[in-house]
Structures are given as structure tokens and as C-alpha cells.
Image (cartoon, rainbow, N blue to C red):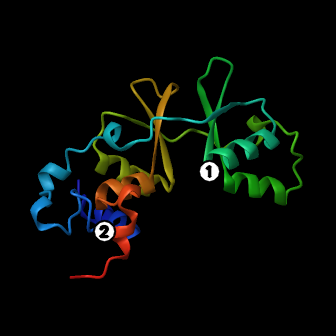
Amino acid sequence: MERFPTQIVVALLYRYCRACPRSILRKEANLDAAEEGRLTVKEVMTSSVVSLHQKAGLGQVIEGLTAHRFGAVLVCGDGGEAKGVISKTDLVRAYLHDVSLDTEAGAVMSMPVAAFSQTAFLWEAIQHMFLKDVQRLFIHAGDPLRITGVLSLSDAAQARSGSCRACLPSRFMTPE
């Protein structure tokens, strides 16, 4: 499959970091296409997953999103299995339709959960996000109902561009 278009899009999401050793701007640290293609989802994903029970109220969902500064939260069933996702967009839609804050998360969640294997290559996950028009994938280790992490477009862009929070000041350096 052609990987070039998704790589360009992700690369354009973030500026290239001049200080990071993985940056493509540093001549001594350039990755060739074959090495770059070996990054797996597990190497890039965020392994902490915030989830709420499907019977939790929308007020709890809002508190969870705000406390963790996330754009979406996983909604789980009684056995901890992934049932759906509630994003900030879902909450805005609920507000516009005068849905009460006491409404259960299960009534507002989007389904199905966009899940992907942690052993897949990063470029495959990025391509899947673009084809499915989702901002994040929930990552599993074999069972799509048992989520082990989250991969967002921003996670993928940081891995692709070499930018990171640790070297944020380098984004403001003037070109040499």
C-alpha cells in the first residue's frame, strides 16, 4: 500500500524539532524509510487509558475529560470491555439537544470503538485513522474489547516528526 500521502499529512501537523535526535532536520540522525516504517503502535501509543462505566453520568464524563485534559474517554461495560467512546464533540451535540448531565454515558457514546492492534506498524494505524476519519485509536493486545492504550494523531505526528514536549523551546529557534 502507498504510505506517502499519510506521512506528508502527519508531518505537516507539527513543526520539525531541531534539537531532538530523531528529527529529520538533523542530518546526523536522519531515518531512512525502512527504519521509519518499523515503528510499531506500541512504541508510540499512550499506555494510560481513562475509562468510565456506561452508567456514569455525563457530568462525570465532563469531569474526567477536564481533569485529564483529554479529547475523549472510553466507555466500558460491567466486565471492563470497551463499549463506546464519548468525545468533546459528542458532549457538544448532547448539550445542543438539551440532554441532562444525569444522562448515562451509554446513551450518548459513539459506537463502535475504533480499535487497532498494538503490534501493527505506525503507518498502518495512521492510514486507518485517515480512512475511518477518527482522531484516535484505542489499542489492544489481541482482544479488541480489552483496551491497553490510545494512539492519537498528535502522538503519531510527534513520532513522525521527532518533536517532543521535552524539546519544545527548540521549536522557536531561528533557522541556521
Q: Position of residue 11 (x, y in %)?
A: 32, 66
Residue hosting label 2? 16
- Is residue 104 or residue 30 the one in the foreground? 30
Q: Position of residue 133 (x, y in %)?
A: 50, 56
Looking at the rendering, which quadrant does residue 165 occupy? bottom left
Q: CA distance from mark 1 to mark 2?
A: 24 Å
Above or below, 69 against 60 in this view is below
Residues at circles 1 and 2 in contact by the CB criterion of under 8 Å? no
Above or below, 109 against 6 in this view is above
Neighbourhood count class around disc 1 (C-alpha, 10 Å): few under 14, some 14–19, many 20 upward: few
- Is residue 81 or residue 176 the one in the foreground? 176
Kind of residue indicated by mark 1? Arg
Looking at the rendering, which quadrant does residue 127 occupy? bottom left
Above or below, 119 against 29 in this view is above
Kind of residue indicated by mark 2? Tyr
Q: Position of residue 168 (x, y in %)?
A: 39, 64
In the image, is 8 to the left or to the right of 52?
left
Residue hosting label 1? 69
Q: Position of residue 7 (x, y in %)?
A: 29, 62
